Amino acid sequence: MALPNFGLVLWLLACVILVGWLQSRVTRHAQLILLLLIRNEHAALLAFQLLFLPGVALHEASHWIVARFLGLRDLEISLWPQRQRDGSVRLGYVKTEQMNFARAAFVGTAPLVAGIVLVSLISARLGLGRLWTAAAAAEAIQLRALLAEVWLRPDLWLWVYLLFACSNTMLPSASDRRALPAAAAVLGGLALGGYLLGMLPLVRVALGGVAWSLASAANVALCITILLDLLLLPLLYLLEALLWRLRGGQLLRA
């Protein structure tokens, strides 16, 4: 089996960029809604942390586990929210000893991998893959039956909440991404060297199946995240506009 082609790589990159933009919109409007509801900055920040706690815990735990696996010690983990000087919110962190760019790249991308795995598992449990296939094949009768099956699940909203919380916290933060350009340059150099030495066919044979499985899982997880956020954003906009009206355009009590 061949490695994923360049078109698929570009598609996945575009999906990651779109997920990043949607995540920033969702979290921003969620913060504003909570602030309008509670009207106390510290309490609203704590409520925001609790809303995304499953995803934050997965994000930071994946950092910690990969760092320990790579032999890093003196780790410090926190799930306590902090507002930064630029107004952004840091929901958690893992502090490690100084590490080279290779280790930093693995640690930094761990939340994305963990998030993709979890979203894929939840989508499989809910049968979203069958929905996707039926929709792509335009099989209306089967699609309606599958939608009814998913809708009648007693645990549906628990899984939807976990999808929301984990998919919107799985992207690497700015500090997580610092080592990625250097890691990408090294991988690009290795790929170029392999191409010049005529070794790429061997790599395709050895890693083709694994690469396609990973690419397929990432594609499903990212597309589900995009669809979920696109459905949710209009509701957040409407709720925020309604609360602005009710509060008279004031975030906090006078």
Image: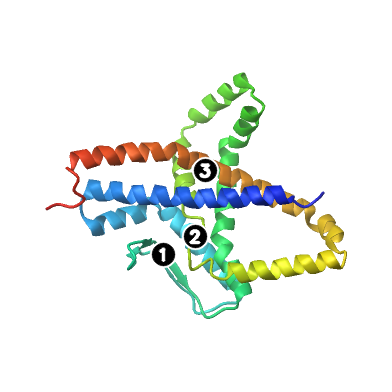
Q: Mark 3 Cα within 10 Å, few/some/many (few <14, many 20+)?
A: many
Q: Residues within 10 Å of mark 2 (few under 14, many from 20)?
A: many
As drawn, the label of residue 226 is 3
**For the image shown, how many numbered marks are present on the structure?**
3
Question: Closer to the N terminus: mark 3 or mark 2?
Answer: 2
Q: Residue at x 84, y 55 (%)?
A: 205
Distance of mark 1 from mark 3, alpha carbons?
Answer: 24 Å
> Callout 3: helix, strand or loop?
helix
Tell which of 185 and 212 is nearer to you.
185
Which numbered tag is attached to residue 59?
2
Q: Residue at x 83, y 61 (%)?
A: 200
Specify whether 187 is left or right of 103.
right
Q: Which residue is mark 1?
A: 92
x then y, percent, for residue 215: 68, 50
**Local SS, label 1:** loop
Residue type pointed to by label 1 = Gly
Label 1 near label 2: C-beta < 8 Å?
yes
Query: Please, is residue 173 above or below residue 141 in the view?
Result: below
N-terminal of the two: label 1 or label 3? 1
Residue 121 can be seen in this image: no
